[in-house]
Image: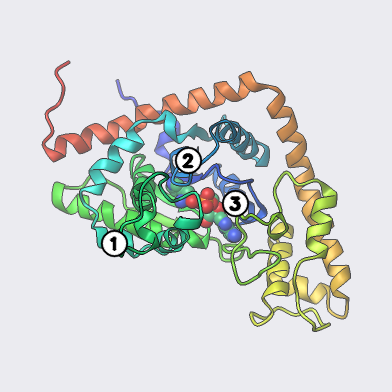
């Protein structure tokens, strides 16, 4: 009997978020919001990628809580467990297994060129990405102390994607380079061992793909930023949202206009446009002749009106732990079944002996 479920006949979409820090408006506008829209037309898998998060040292009890909290926030944002599969990455061992296989097709040079690795490893000495209790290599730069998982991170991400024959990966702009590696690895494996993987496409939104920090609009808003004023968390109370937007860095001009040379205002306009579902030009027109402070207070109220119902649903979900556990158990079972199909095929093609049944 065929194991193919009706839902699997739709093309597959997969994406994930690392459970580090607090989910922020950047994650919502660049990724999560799109996930919700894609559920009708695609067979969607959304993961809490906890194995990615351990590339930076985490406090175990906090990581455990955050994984459940992130899954609940996915659902609160509109991911419907009846239509989409929600799973925790470490519940599906095939991700780590395929990573090993794909690492044999990845060069050190390719991984060393990854912007995210370069940025994070440069800071490794001063952050939790350095391996504790290991003496520094003489003459080696900061990156020598970065843990090897940080280096391998993009291969694990490729495994996440390729295990499910994913056609599209909805992500923000910062994941483009990682996606490129996943595509290269799919093509490389297919070329050497015959057609096995679908080559995935990035789904990057035209507007909102890179939401910037509120205090330093030249760098991206990040959920693990040490300064909470840089980002708006999805669970921030209304007063915090008002305060953070009021204090967001803009410029000394008075007229509201979208210009890349005015990155603070451009960022706030982008946020408004995506939250409201309107083109940026329309927002600029609507605020022509009005003050920055009017615009900022309207933006804060708009963000609150989008986030409040999400926060309400989140609180309800967190009170029903058994429901959440069930969703994640179902998701993991479904992912393991589907991932094993791909992994068995991969092992066979590589020439690994199949275990006797
Ligand atoms: P992560 O956890 O850093 O971010 C999760 C998603 O949010 C997007 N994003 C943003 N979009 C717009 N503006 C921002 N300021 C902003 N900050 C983050 C990210 O692009 C991402 O889509 N490596 C991934 C997680 C991952 C993954 C995967 C994604 C692991 N396996 C497989 C897709 C498919 C990451 O660190 O995302």
Pointers 3 and 2 in contact (C-beta within 8 Å):
no
Q: CA distance from mark 3 to mark 1?
A: 26 Å
- Name the residue nearer the viewer: 21 or 41: 21
Quarter in which the C terminus is drawn: top left
Q: Residue at x 85, y 51 (%)?
A: 239
The residue pinned by badge 2 equals 49
In the rendered view, tell whether residue 119 sits above or below residue 52. Answer: below
Which of discs 3 and 2 lies nearer the camera? The answer is: 3
Residue 139: x, y in percent?
30, 65
Q: Earlier in the sequence, mark 3 or mark 2?
A: 2
Q: Residues within 10 Å of mark 2 (few under 14, many from 20)?
A: many
Based on the displayed image, in which of its 4 quarters is residue 140 positioned? Answer: bottom left
Pointers 3 and 1 in contact (C-beta within 8 Å):
no
Residue 224 — which label?
Answer: 3
| Ligand 1 neighbours mark 2 (CB distance < 8 Å) | yes
Residue 4 seen in render: no
What secondary structure is found at the residue carrying circle 1? helix
Q: CA distance from mark 2 to mark 1?
A: 22 Å
Q: Residues within 10 Å of mark 3 (few under 14, many from 20)?
A: some
């Amino acid at each position: 009997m065929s194991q193919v479920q009706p839902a699997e006949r739709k093309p597959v979409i997969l994406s994930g978020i690392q459970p580090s820090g607090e989910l922020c408006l950047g994650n919502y506008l660049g990724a999560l919001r799109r996930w919700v829209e894609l559920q009708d037309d695609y067979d969607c898998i959304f993961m809490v990628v906890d194995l990615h998060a351990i590339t930076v040292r985490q406090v175990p009890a906090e990581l455990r809580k955050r994984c459940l909290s992130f899954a609940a926030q996915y659902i609160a944002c509109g991911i419907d467990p009846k239509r989409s599969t929600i799973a925790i990455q470490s519940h599906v061992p095939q991700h780590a297994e395929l990573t090993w296989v794909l690492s044999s097709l990845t060069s050190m040079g390719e991984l060393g060129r990854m912007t995210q690795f370069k940025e994070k490893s440069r800071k490794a000495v001063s952050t939790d990405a350095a391996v504790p209790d290991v003496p520094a290599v003489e003459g080696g730069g900061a990156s020598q102390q970065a843990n090897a998982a940080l280096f391998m991170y993009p291969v694990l991400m490729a495994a996440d994607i390729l295990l499910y024959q994913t056609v599209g990966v909805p992500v923000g702009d910062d994941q483009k380079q990682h996606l490129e590696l996943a595509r290269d690895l799919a093509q490389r494996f297919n070329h050497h061992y015959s057609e096995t993987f679908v080559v995935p496409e990035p789904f990057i939104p035209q507007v909102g793909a890179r939401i910037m920090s509120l205090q330093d609009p030249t760098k991206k808003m990040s959920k693990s930023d040490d300064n909470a004023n840089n980002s708006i968390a999805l669970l921030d109370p209304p007063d915090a949202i008002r305060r953070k937007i009021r204090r967001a860095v803009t410029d000394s001009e008075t007229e509201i206009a979208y210009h890349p040379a005015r990155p603070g205002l451009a960022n706030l306009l982008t946020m408004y446009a995506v939250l409201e579902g309107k083109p940026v030009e329309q927002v600029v027109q609507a605020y022509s002749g009005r003050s920055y402070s009017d615009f900022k207070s309207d933006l804060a109220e708009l963000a609150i009106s989008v986030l409040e119902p999400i926060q309400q649903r989140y609180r309800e979900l967190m009170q029903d732990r058994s429901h959440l556990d069930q969703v994640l158990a179902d998701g993991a079972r479904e992912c393991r079944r589907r991932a094993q199909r791909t992994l068995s095929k991969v092992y066979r093609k590589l020439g690994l002996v199949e275990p006797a049944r």
